[in-house]
């Protein structure tokens, strides 16, 4: 079972990652839930991307590395959404 503090940290990292990606990509805020979902999905995308590129330097930064990984993944997602024209 996942401990409550771990869930809270994951949600906060996701929120920070989504917000940061939206800021960097110059998109309007998606709101609390939108930023949270973007950050969590972005963390998965960023983690896979960094894994396949052989980048592991951010792991040593702890929670900051997690936020940066999530933000990069979320920015990639936002870029793909812009390319496909699926944004609202």
Image (tube, helix red, strand yellow):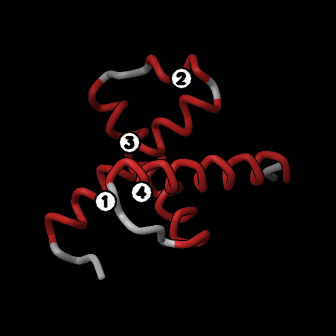
- Residue at x-position 46% and y-position 37%: 69
From the viewer's perspective, is the residue at label 3 or at label 2 nearer? Answer: 3
In the drawing, does residue 84 fall left or right of residue 64?
left
**Marks 4 and 3: CB-CB under 8 Å?**
no
- Residue at x-position 48% and y-position 71%: 30
- Residue at x-position 30% and y-position 82%: 88
Q: Mark 3 points at which residue?
A: 72
Q: Mark 2 points at which residue?
A: 59
In the drawing, does residue 26 fall left or right of residue 10?
left
Q: Mark 4 points at which residue?
A: 22
Asked which secondary structure carries label 2, the reply is helix
Label 3 neighbour load within 10 Å: few <14, some 14-19, many 20+:
many
Label 1 neighbour load within 10 Å: few <14, some 14-19, many 20+:
many
Distance CA(mark 2)–CA(mark 1): 23 Å
Q: Earlier in the sequence, mark 4 or mark 3?
A: 4
Q: Which of marks 3 and 2 is nearer the N terminus?
A: 2
Q: In this view, does 11 lie above or below 31?
A: above
Asked which secondary structure carries label 1, the reply is helix
Instruction: Give how far across and how far down residue 79 sits, in percent.
Output: 24, 56
Distance CA(mark 1)–CA(mark 3): 10 Å
From the viewer's perspective, is the residue at label 2 or at label 4 nearer? Answer: 4
Residue 77 placement: quadrant = bottom left
Residue 52: give its label.
none
Q: Name the residue under label 1.
A: 78
């Amino acid at each position: 079972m996942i401990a409550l503090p771990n869930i809270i940290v994951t949600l906060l990292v996701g929120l920070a990652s989504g917000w940061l990606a939206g800021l960097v990509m110059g998109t309007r805020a998606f709101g609390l839930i939108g930023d949270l979902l973007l950050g969590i999905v972005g963390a998965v995308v960023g983690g896979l991307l960094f894994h396949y590129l052989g980048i592991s330097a951010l792991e040593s930064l702890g929670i900051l590395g997690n936020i940066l990984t999530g933000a990069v993944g979320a920015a990639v997602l936002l870029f793909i959404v812009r390319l496909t024209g699926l944004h609202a």
